[in-house]
């Protein structure tokens, strides 16, 4: 079937099934194009919880569909590619986290949303790349455990007075961005601002004019008077940045900024998912309730 016909059939079936199509900012261009909403990990899960549609098709990776299933337990959540995982989320297991907690009794665990439901269930509060410092500073404790991203952890540790104990995980996609390639892009485009995701290693963040989540990048690009931006995150973000800011230029400093898991989902997968209403993502009730409490504690933290 030609791409245009697949897109039309997806839209027709989505309507028939009363389904909401969600796409993360790192998805392939054509997936973002057919989605009802494109956004960051947590933002999309909140949309899933708030919609009156009964079916959620989550074009992203496994932990995101799980978050939607946790926040919207009454909905049917489909992940077109169940093999689309997140290597960073897989770097921490509930058992490993329990061992870390045993080494630091009573110290609260702040877990990045890029984690499994089972790890969230073992944690005290969640955070995203957009609210991490605010969440950590909202806690009455003097020490915190930050899981699983060591880069986000170091970024937080530099912005809080609390003693931070970091899990040694990382995002392989952001980790492989070479400093030299960012420096070369900055030399080639001295008038450009460099925005970087906090999952980047500290040497990269040290070069950034602005450090923010994927949604933060859209806000920054739109509100800044600058006309050129070097983008330190996964390549998929360029599609909407360019579509919504046609007068501005966005430069990817490296061809390595591709998350293979985020690129797995194809139009054919989305169509197949809607045709078969599978694969469905569910979270066992006991894990779901504890993970939900961890997410809800984060959502209750007041905004600045
Ligand atoms: P955000 O979209 O929440 O910034 O997350 C980035 C990411 O790596 C998602 O996998
Ligand atoms: Fe995981 Fe990194 Fe891919 Fe996001 S970009 S899904 S954190 S591996």
Image (cartoon, rainbow, N blue to C red):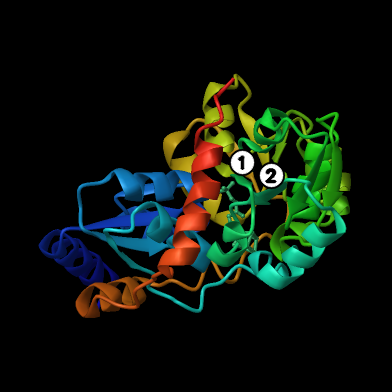
In the picture, measured across the screen, residue 71 lies left or right of residue 118, that is left
Residue hosting label 2: 197
Circles 2 and 1: CB atoms closer than 8 Å: yes
What's the residue at 42%, 57% (across, down)? 70
The residue located at (59%, 57%) in the rendering is 120
Q: Is label 1 within 8 A of ligand 1 (CB to nearest ligand atom)?
A: yes
The residue lying furthest to the front in this view is: 106
Q: Quarter of the image for the N terminus: give it.
A: bottom left
From the top left corner, tell me how far across and down residue 45 is, in percent: 42, 50
The quarter of the image that holds ligand 2 is bottom right
The residue located at (10%, 63%) in the rendering is 16
Q: Residue at x 50, y 37 (%)?
A: 299
Q: Is mark 2 within 8 Å of ligand 1?
A: yes
In front here: 112 or 80?
112
Q: Is residue 87 left or right of residue 50?
A: right
Give x and y (percent) for residue 116.
57, 65
Q: Mark 1 points at which residue?
A: 213
Report the side of 99 relative to 294 (left or right). right
Indicate which disc, 2 or 1, sits on the residue closer to the N terminus.
2
The quarter in which the C terminus is drawn is top right
Badge 2 marks a residue whose secondary structure is: loop
Residue 96 placement: quadrant: bottom right
């Amino acid at each position: 079937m030609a791409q245009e016909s697949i897109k039309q059939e997806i839209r027709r079936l989505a309507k028939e099934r009363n389904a909401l199509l969600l796409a993360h900012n790192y998805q392939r261009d054509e997936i973002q194009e057919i989605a009802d909403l494109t956004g960051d990990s947590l933002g999309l899960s909140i949309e899933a919880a708030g919609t009156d549609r009964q079916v959620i098709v989550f074009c992203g990776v496994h932990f995101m569909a799980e978050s939607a299933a946790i926040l919207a337990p009454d909905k049917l959540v489909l992940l077109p590619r169940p093999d689309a995982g997140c290597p960073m989320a897989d770097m921490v297991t509930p058992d490993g986290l329990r061992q870390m907690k045993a080494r630091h009794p009573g110290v609260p665990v702040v877990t990045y949303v890029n984690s499994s439901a089972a790890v969230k269930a073992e944690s005290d509060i969640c955070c995203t790349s957009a609210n991490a410092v605010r969440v950590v500073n909202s806690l009455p404790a003097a020490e915190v455990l930050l899981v699983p991203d060591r880069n986000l952890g170091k970024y937080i540790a530099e912005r809080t007075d609390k003693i931070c104990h970091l899990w040694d995980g990382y995002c392989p996609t952001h980790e492989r961005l070479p400093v030299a390639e960012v420096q070369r892009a900055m030399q080639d485009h001295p008038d450009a601002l460099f925005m970087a995701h906090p999952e980047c290693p500290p040497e990269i963040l040290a070069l950034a004019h602005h450090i923010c989540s994927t949604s933060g990048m859209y806000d920054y690009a739109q509100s800044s008077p600058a006309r050129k931006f070097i983008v330190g995150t996964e390549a998929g973000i360029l599609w909407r940045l360019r579509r919504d800011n046609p007068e501005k230029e966005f430069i990817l400093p490296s061809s390595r900024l591709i998350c293979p898991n985020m690129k797995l989902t194809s139009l054919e997968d989305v169509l197949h998912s809607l045709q078969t209403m599978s694969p469905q993502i569910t979270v066992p009730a006991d894990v779901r309730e504890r993970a939900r409490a961890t997410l809800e504690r984060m959502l209750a933290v007041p905004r600045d």
